[in-house]
Amino acid sequence: MAKKEIICAFGVDVDAVAGQIGSYAGGNSPSDISRGVFAAEVGTPRMLKMFDKLGIRTSWFIPGHSIETFPKEMKMVADAGHEIGLHGYTHENPIAMTPEQEADVLDKTLGLVTKLAGKRPTGYVAPWWEMSKATPGLLMERGIKYDHSQMHDDFLPYWMRINEKWDLIDYS
């Protein structure tokens, strides 16, 4: 029987502590912070070791806060040759920001990821899996080619649907 080649794409979101700070008031919770520290300091090296053992190259989407707070672990990701993409600064919700604030966050993290990876990123994962109306344009202006958080299809790349309006159903 002929062998079939199976191609998979693996994306890793390294929220670490940024996920707790930017997503909800978890910045005040020692348990949440300890979980984020564990993810960066223990989880990242373990995953890198596993991917290396299996010969798998992956895409890591890292908030700027994680790059600044865990520089050693995030450098390990870059040094292992994995792609590094944008994932906000402190996992802030794009819908809760003005377009100017969102642009500032993208520019700050673009600089951090470019410095870490040695090249500009081309991928993005939306914090909170949310996009504002401004997000697609802001990403395109910065040369971002794909968004790993969109889920229209599991096998084929597709163009993101923008400027659509979905009517809410009034159940009252």
Image: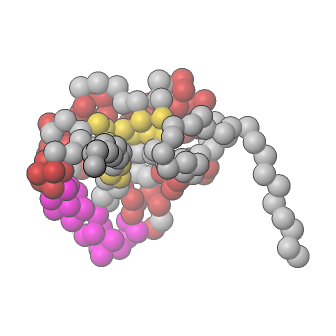
Residue at the far front in the pictured view: 1
Question: Which color scheme does this rendered protein use?
Answer: secondary structure
The residue positioned 47% from the left and 29% from the top of the image is 144
Depth check: 14 or 48 in front? Answer: 48
Establish if 141 lies above or below 53.
above
Depth check: 26 or 53 in front? Answer: 53
Asked if residue 129 is among those painted magenta in the image, a careful observer would answer no
Q: Is residue 104 visible?
A: no
The residue positioned 51% from the left and 56% from the top of the image is 128
Question: Which SS type dominates the magenta stretch?
Answer: helix
The residue positioned 29% from the left and 24% from the top of the image is 119
Instruction: Please tell me in which quadrant of the rendered image residue 99 appears.
Output: top right
Q: Position of residue 5 (x, y in %)?
A: 31, 43
Range of residues picked out in magenta: 26-47
Q: Position of residue 107 (x, y in %)?
A: 44, 31
Q: Is residue 122 visible?
A: yes
The residue positioned 40% from the left and 51% from the top of the image is 90
Tally of marks: 0
Q: Is residue 2 left or right of residue 152?
A: left
Instruction: Please tell me in which quadrant of the rendered image residue 112 appears.
Output: top left
Q: Quadrant location of the C terminus?
A: bottom right
Q: Position of residue 42 (x, y in %)?
A: 16, 62
Asked if residue 36 is among those painted magenta in the image, a careful observer would answer yes
